Image (cartoon, rainbow, N blue to C red):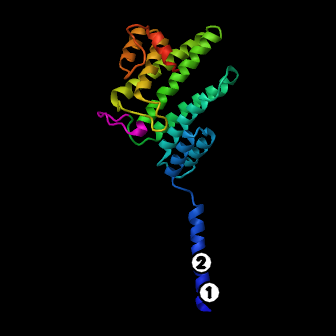
Amino acid sequence: MIKKIFIVFFFIFMGCDQLIEKTSPLDGIYYIVDGWEKFEAEDYNRAHDLFSTVLLNNSTQYFTEAYVGLAWNSIYKANTIQGASNSSDREYQRDISNQYFNLAIEYNNETCPPENSDDCSVLCQNLLTGRVYNSSYQALEASRKFYDYGLDSINLLDMVDYSNETINISDTLLNQCNSEYIFDHDEVVTFNRIRILRAQTFIRLGDFESAQAELILVDGLECGLSTQTVIECLNSLDIE
């Protein structure tokens, strides 16, 4: 009888332990991994929830990773919001992405990029590349608004500011980080693509010479600058 009672208490004890283990919060890195999986599956709402869950933790260990994930997620979610009638929602996602990147920088324990070194971490490269992409999209949006809504000088100034930000951040990225970089959650995003974004940005700023110089550096460029103008070349690439 005593033996049976012992066995019952043993299983109750083990069951409680297992229940606690299953219901305890996971370590932040698990939510980061799951968040990127949802991002890659284009489930941006669920990805947002998973990255945000990390921020509920008392430890700030993975806050930089979470904010970088949230920022990229907002960039891609904005790209799914089409049409002039939805421009405010699209712009909100762009703006909040900037805020997430700034928070990622605030919580980052490492200098990004590192001083006196070209050994940028993947996290640092993802952060800088995301900022380049987002500012490039914002420059494009401001440019469209300038031409679509009566040549408002405020939109023109915004376009110039975002374009300069795109060039300045990408200067840092290209000069101090790995030129073989590929975004690990979307292989389309590479340094070649960043150089194309820079060429487009120089065109917006009216600097055709710098745009051409940038395109020359693109590996495997699928247009001929000897027979095409810079704008014709960029248009043939069908990349915004």
Q: Does the rendering let one see residue 143? A: yes
Q: Main secondary structure of the magenta part?
A: loop
Residue where numbered disc 2 is placed:
11
Q: Residues within 10 Å of mark 1 (few under 14, many from 20)?
A: few
Residue where numbered disc 1 is placed:
5
Q: Residues within 10 Å of mark 2 (few under 14, many from 20)?
A: few
Q: Position of residue 58 (x, y in %)?
A: 53, 52
SS state under label 2: helix
Of 89 and 82, nearer the camera is 82
Q: Position of residue 147 (x, y in %)?
A: 61, 10
Q: Amino acid at mark 2?
A: Phe
- What segment carries the magenta color? 113-124
Q: Position of residue 19 (x, y in %)?
A: 60, 67
Q: Residue 49 appears in which quarter of the rendering? A: top right
Please tell me which residue is depicted at 62% across the width and 82% down the height of the picture: 8
Residue 6 sits above or below residue 227 on the image: below
Question: Which of the two labelled residues, at mark 2 and mark 1, occupies the earlier sequence position?
Answer: 1
